[in-house]
Amino acid sequence: MPQYDLSAAELAAYRGSVTEPTGLAAFWEETLQASRARARAPRVEPVDARLPLVEVSDVTLSGYDGEPVRAWYRRPAGVGGDLPLVIRYQGYTGGRGLPHQVPHWTLAGYATLDVDSRGQGSGGGWVGDTPDPHGHGPSYLGGFMTRGLEDPARHYYRRLLTDAVLAVDAGVALPGVDRDRVVVAGVSQGGGIALAVSGLHDGLAGVLADVPFLCDMPRGVAIASAGPYLEVAAFLASHRDAADRAFATLAHFDAAVLGRRATAPALMSVALMDTVCPPSTVHAARNTYGGPSELVVYPWNDHEGGQFHQEAAQLEWLAKLLGGPTPGRG
C-alpha cells in the first residue's frame, strides 16, 4: 500500500472534520456519574501464572451501570512500595488475554492493568471474559461500530468508554499503586480509548496512544480501505438516509474530540501507510490534543505501526515522565 493520504504539510495542519456535539460535557457527566454511583470496590484475587518474576491478580472492577469488567493486574515479584501503573486497553476484537501474556511495561518494573473489552475478546489470540448484556439495533455482521448508531445513549462505545474511565478509578484503588503516576495506553482501538479517557478523567500522568482508532471517524469511514471503519460504510450503504444521525452519534465517542479536553502529556504514533486508521485521522487527534504531545512517525508501515520500536520509545518516554518505575510512596 503506498502513502495515500494528505501531504506532510497538510497532515501537520489537519485538525479533523468533527464538530463537538451540543451537550457533550453533560452527556458524559451524567453517564459517568450514574455508573460511579453503582460502582463497587475492585475484587482482587491472586493467580498462579507460573511466572516467578511476575505477580498476577485477577481483577473484577465495576464498569458501565455497575456491570463487572475483568482485568489482569500485574506487578514485578518481590517489589515493595507503590509503583506507577500503566492501564492498557485492547485492540478491536481483542480481550485481556491470558494471565501469562505479560506486557513490556511489567518487565520494565511498572505495575500494569490489562482491561477487558466487553463483548469482544475473540480476535488475535487475545481472549476476553466480559460479556456485553445490552441489546442493540441493526448492525453490520454484529460489528461493534454499528451497535446503537441510532442513539448515542444506546451505542456500544458509551458502555466501553465508561468501562475504561472507571478502570482508572479502580486502578488507583489497587494495592501497591502510586495514584499520582497513572498512565493509560493502547494500540489501535486501545489507543483511541486511551485518548478518549484522557479527556474524561482528571489526574492522569500520561497517555500512550499508538496508531489510534476512533479518531475523526467520518474521515476514517470515507477513506479507510481495511478494518472496522468499513462496518460503518457498509451499514450506510444499506441505510442510505442514516449518515447524519450515525455520525452525530459517533461524535460523542470520537477520541479526537474528547482528547481536546485532556491535559496529560501524550506520546502518540502514526503509520503513513496505515489502511485501517488513516494518517490524517491520527493527526487530527494529535493536532487538537489538549495537553503536550509528541508524535512518532513510521513512514513505511501499515497498521502494525512501530511495534517493538515503539515499545522502546515508550520505555524511554515513561522513564523521563515518571522518573522510572521505582516505588513512590511505600
Image: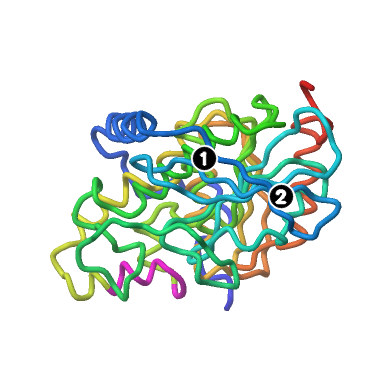
The residue labelled by disc 2 is 56
**Regarding mark 2 in the picture, which secondary structure is present there?**
strand
Asked whether residue 248 is in view, the answer is: no
Q: Is residue 295 above or below residue 297?
A: above
- Identify the image quadrant of the N terminus: bottom right
Point 61% across, 70% down: residue: 302
Q: Amino acid at mark 2?
A: Val
Q: From the viewer's perspective, is 141 left or right of 98?
A: left
Q: Amino acid at mark 1?
A: Ala
Q: Residue furthest left?
A: 241
Task: Identify the mark nearer the N-term, 1 or 2.
Answer: 2
- How far, Cα to Cα, is label 1 from label 2? 17 Å
Point 55% across, 57% down: residue: 90
Q: Are marks 1 and 2 in contact (CB under 8 Å)?
A: no
Asked whether residue 300 is in view, the answer is: yes
Crowding at label 1, few (<14), some or many (≥20) Cα neighbours within 10 Å?
Answer: many
Is label 1 or label 2 in front? 2
Q: Magenta residues? A: 225-234
Locate residue 70, reporting x and y percent: 52, 51
Point 52% across, 42% down: residue: 287
The residue labelled by disc 1 is 167
